[in-house]
Amino acid sequence: MLHQIDPVLTAAQAFLGERISRNAAIREQHSHGEDTNPPALPDAVAFVETTEEVAKILALCNRYRVPVVPFGAGTSLEGHVTPIRGGLSLDLSRMNRILEVNAEDMDCRVEAGVTRQALNAHLRDLGLFFPVDPGSECTLGGMCATRASGTNAVRYGTIRENVLGLTVVLADGRVIQTGRRVRKSATGYDLTRLFIGSEGTLGVITEIQLRLHGIPEAMSAAVCQFADLKGTVETVVDVMQAGIPVARMEFLDDVQMRAAIAFSKLEGFAARPTLFFEFHGTHASVIEQAKLAEALAQEHGGSDFRWATETTERSRLWKARHDAYWAALALRPGYRALTTDAIVPISRLPEAILGARADIDASGFTAPMVGHVGDGNFHTVILFPPEPGALERAWALDRKIVARALALGGSCSGEHGVGLGKREFLEQEHGAGALAVMRSLKATLDPHGILNPGKIFLN
Ligand SMILES: Cc1cc2nc3c(=O)[nH]c(=O)nc-3n(C[C@H](O)[C@H](O)[C@H](O)COP(=O)(O)OP(=O)(O)OC[C@H]3O[C@@H](n4cnc5c(N)ncnc54)[C@H](O)[C@@H]3O)c2cc1C
């Protein structure tokens, strides 16, 4: 697509001033996310502060056919923010105001550039929290656009279940509201869910109405270590099938535990397959849930639970889990990481994880595994050296893990999204008919194809 950036720059400077930039360092910062795809420079970067500015920019870009790539914090893992066709990187990180909190209704409205950490810091004194917690410092707009989740999703749902409504700017600059401040509504098509997971290809999200949750009366974390991988994963299946309402159930294999012990100074633990649990509820219910889970773990060779009830100790454990990616990278200094994100129905998790481990062993890569296993979702952090052909071999391993997940009725991505990296699997996962409907939605909402072109769909 031929595009004309100069008239957009001239017109946008009138209302953005120096907040639209062609500075080389700023363009470089917006040329990639946290992924292994080759970077590509945008022609310019605009730092927007209001919905009206986004609307004006999009109307201009639509008129001059300039690609627009929304940019939150740039932490996505599949090449989502790389402007492969140039154009404008639209940085929303300065739209970081918390607009309203309705404590009685347990909801709030935020701008898209607010991070979940900033929101939770703001909510703490109100006895409320927002549970969706990817292991990165990312924006709520980016989380909506990638349909993100994290360790709490097994109990509180993903971002999809926690968004009530959105303000979205369409490709031609029209502004729409989706949803209302209610927990459910049976009216019309669900446009909120259409934009969630659309990866900046259907519209730019500028405001988000979120559900909040009360901080539970009691929270306690426990760690259980296992003799082998099989017993670990079978425990997960049993806990889910028993209906124990775990708030978090995270898996770290022996290699990831070795990394976490070194990186996060987790004294007293062995480099063995491990489950981190967290239980929320009343004091009595937390004890009951934990006893049930512990009994199931023991049936599969799990050790006694090691408890962390104090806030500092719980935070230390969960920080170690959230730092898993950086701990994995520290295992092989100078290497880079390709992260898989397969998800399978919970009963197929043992096959998926044991199969992935066999694939890793055959590949010769060091590739720690972690996972939000209560959802059936696990990641393999494939560490590859800076050598010709190594990235391609890492991709070959990723493809094997995805192929098995798809064959088991799963998906190539539980939470990271499609971007550039997972496009090749979409037809197999959804079928040609469903993919054609997705393409026609894209053509209707963005007829000139300016919004994050080249993402989600091949060609
Ligand atoms: C160490 C690490 C751990 C991670 N752990 C998790 C995890 O546990 N769970 C998980 O789900 N993800 C995880 N991620 C991936 C990443 O953090 C998420 O995908 C996150 O939601 C991206 O948010 P962002 O603000 O960085 O978005 P960006 O990377 O800036 O953008 C992501 C996509 O969303 C679009 N976009 C951004 N903002 C908007 C907007 N306002 N309107 C429309 N489109 C927009 C972009 O165009 C792009 O397509 C992890 C990443 C890292 C590096």
Image (cartoon, grey):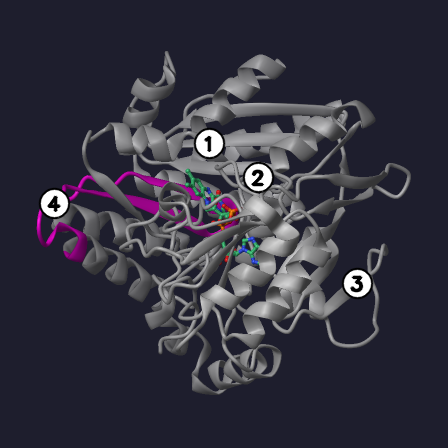
Residue drawn 46% across the image and 66% down it: 5
Mark 4–mark 2 distance (CA, rounded to whole Å): 32 Å
Circles 4, 1 touching at the beta carbon (< 8 Å) = no
Drawn side of residue 292 relative to residue 320, left or right: right
Residue holding disc 1: 322
The residue carrying mark 2 has its beta carbon less than 8 Å from ligand 1: yes
Q: Residues within 10 Å of mark 2 (few under 14, many from 20)?
A: many
Tag 3: amino acid: Gly
Circle 2 is placed at which residue position? 133
Query: Label 4 sits on what residue type?
Result: Gly
How many angstroms separate mark 2 from mark 1 (CA)? 9 Å
Q: Position of residue 207 (x, y in %)?
A: 72, 52
Disc 2 marks which amino acid?
Asp
- In x, y percent, where is residue 290? 60, 29
Q: Secondary structure at mark 1?
A: helix
Is residue 153 in the magenta section? no
Q: Which residues are magenta?
A: 364-392
Q: Residue at x 28, y 38 (%)?
A: 368
Q: Which residue corresponds to the image point at 15% horizontal and 55% vertical from the top-left?
A: 393
Viewer-nearest of discs 4 and 1: 1
Residue 179, labelled with which disc? 3
Distance Cα–Cα, label 4 vs label 3: 49 Å
Query: Which marked residue is nearer to the observer: mark 4 or mark 2?
Result: 2
Please tell me which residue lies in front, 206 or 24. 24
Residue 378 shows up from this direction:
yes
Name the image quarter holding the C terminus. bottom left
Marks 2 and 1 close (CB-CB < 8 Å): yes
User: Which element carries disc 3, helix, strand or loop?
Assistant: strand
Q: Quadrant of the N terminus?
A: bottom left
